Image: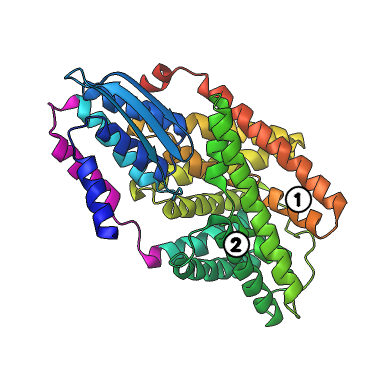
């Protein structure tokens, strides 16, 4: 039955319908985590290259609707459902490159276009060892960047390593995102408390910060902000709710595991260290860059962009630390840092001829208020209303500030960046 279904889908894709090509492009982009407005723009671009007139596409977070008139004057229409998103920014870049080549080259046969799309879709990402290294250095890097001492950040990195191993095997059996998040936060909480029990640390809250950053729904949050800034309120709200559900799942996993373990310590506010002095700020900035590159690896970004992403992540976090110290205003620090990140993401995207998502979705990670949302929900669940309100207000202000920063940079005409 499965073979018959696959055969039917393959025959439909390679049928005489020209509209199947932009539909397949849209499916791959959505599956890989592209913004809906980018999916629509790319589909329209491909349809125009193929000579499809009066092409209209409408994209939701789980479906694509499109219609158009082919070169023979035949009206075509198609509806397609899209599976759950698995963020793979390399595929977004490669599909974007293919769409550009369609207009530059002479008319490419449909079979050749489908062959290229199949090659992109079936390409394998980074291997198991690289993924584990990304989990370790991501947890370690963001632990240091957020003010956690070196030794505790190493413990956080080990917890992130445990999370990477567990995720690798659990994803083979579980496909539901929020369940994976609950189990992931359980693994982090269990591994941290076991290491504390063995005398490797003293403050579970502090040890868990970096590892829990690996579960923060940064891409969903960033895409939500960008969709809302493009007036795509339905999709933007849906992505924002997905990010919120992820943070709720993190809180449930931590709270449940802490309650069940007989030797687990009660969670309190994470105690970091004062990030004072230019040298210490620079160290934190470098580790923020390491964490940012680790997230880029987890999102399957091509390694040729790692230096760019790491530099943006480091400089943006240094700007945040410096502005926050001199102004004493967290919102001001987030605003300047987010403006820097959004501006240079667009600049590098134009220079490298790749989607802005490659840089923005990864470099914004240090500023994403995911940990704050997790804390707000966790303290709400455990009955600490004062701390919940504190973190909730901070998260709302940070999210709103990031949205303003991205909105400001998006008002700059694309031609400004293409001339640079």
* In-image side of 313 versus 247 (left or right): left
Looking at this view, name the residue that lies furthest to the bottom.
Answer: 198
- Which mark is first along the chain, 2 or 1? 2
Residue 323 shows in this picture: no
* In-image side of 158 versus 16 (left or right): right
Few, some or many residues within 10 Å of mark 2 (<14, 14–19, 20+): many
Q: Depth check: 278 or 290 in front? A: 290
Q: Which residue is mark 2?
A: 211
Residue beneath the point at 20% across and 44% down: 11
Magenta span includes 206: no
Q: Main secondary structure of the magenta part?
A: helix
Q: Which residue is mark 1?
A: 376
Mark 1 element type: helix
Query: Which quadrant: the C terminus?
Result: top left
Image height check: is 9 above or below 68? below
**Location of residue 333 in the rendering, given as x and y in whole percent from the top left corner:** 68, 36
Q: Which residues are magenta?
A: 104-130
Q: Depth check: 394 or 272 in front? A: 394
Mark 2 element type: helix
Magenta span includes 109: yes
């Amino acid at each position: 039955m499965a073979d018959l279904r696959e055969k039917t889908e393959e025959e439909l894709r390679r049928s005489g319908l020209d509209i199947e090509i932009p539909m397949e492009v849209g499916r791959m982009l959505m599956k890989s985590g592209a913004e809906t407005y980018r999916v629509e723009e790319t589909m329209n671009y491909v349809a125009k290259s193929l000579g499809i007139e009066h092409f209209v596409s409408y994209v939701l977070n789980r479906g694509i609707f499109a219609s158009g008139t082919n070169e023979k004057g035949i009206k075509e229409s198609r509806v397609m459902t899209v599976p759950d998103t698995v963020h793979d920014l390399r595929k977004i870049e490669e599909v974007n490159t293919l769409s550009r080549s369609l207009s530059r080259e002479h008319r490419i046969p449909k079979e050749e276009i489908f062959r290229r799309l199949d090659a992109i879709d079936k390409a394998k990402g980074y291997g198991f060892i690289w993924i584990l290294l990304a989990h370790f250095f991501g947890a370690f890097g963001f632990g240091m960047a957020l003010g956690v001492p070196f030794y505790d950040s190493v413990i956080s990195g080990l917890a992130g390593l445990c999370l990477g191993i567990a995720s690798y095997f659990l994803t083979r059996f579980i496909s539901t995102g929020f369940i994976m998040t609950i189990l992931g936060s359980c693994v982090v909480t269990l591994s941290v408390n076991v290491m504390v029990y063995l005398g490797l640390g003293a403050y579970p809250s502090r040890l868990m910060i970096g590892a829990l950053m690996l579960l923060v729904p940064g891409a969903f949050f960033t895409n939500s902000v960008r969709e809302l800034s493009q007036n795509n309120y339905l999709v933007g709200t849906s992505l924002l709710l997905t990010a919120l559900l992820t943070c709720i799942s993190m809180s449930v996993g931590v709270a449940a595991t802490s309650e069940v373990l007989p030797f687990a310590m009660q969670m309190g506010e994470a105690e970091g260290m004062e990030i004072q002095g230019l040298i210490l700020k620079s160290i934190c900035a470098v580790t923020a860059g390491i964490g940012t590159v680790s997230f880029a690896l987890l999102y399957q970004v091509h390694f040729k962009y790692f230096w760019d992403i790491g530099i943006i992540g480091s400089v943006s976090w240094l700007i945040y630390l410096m502005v926050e110290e001199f102004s004493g205003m967290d919102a001001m620090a987030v605003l300047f840092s987010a403006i820097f990140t959004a501006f240079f993401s667009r600049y590098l995207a134009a220079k490298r001829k790749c989607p802005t998502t490659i840089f923005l979705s990864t470099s914004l990670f240090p500023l994403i208020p995911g940990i704050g949302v997790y804390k707000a929900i966790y303290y709400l669940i455990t009955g600490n209303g004062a701390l919940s309100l504190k973190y909730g207000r901070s998260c709302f202000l940070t999210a709103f500030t990031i949205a303003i920063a991205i909105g400001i940079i998006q008002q700059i005409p694309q031609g400004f960046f293409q001339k640079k």
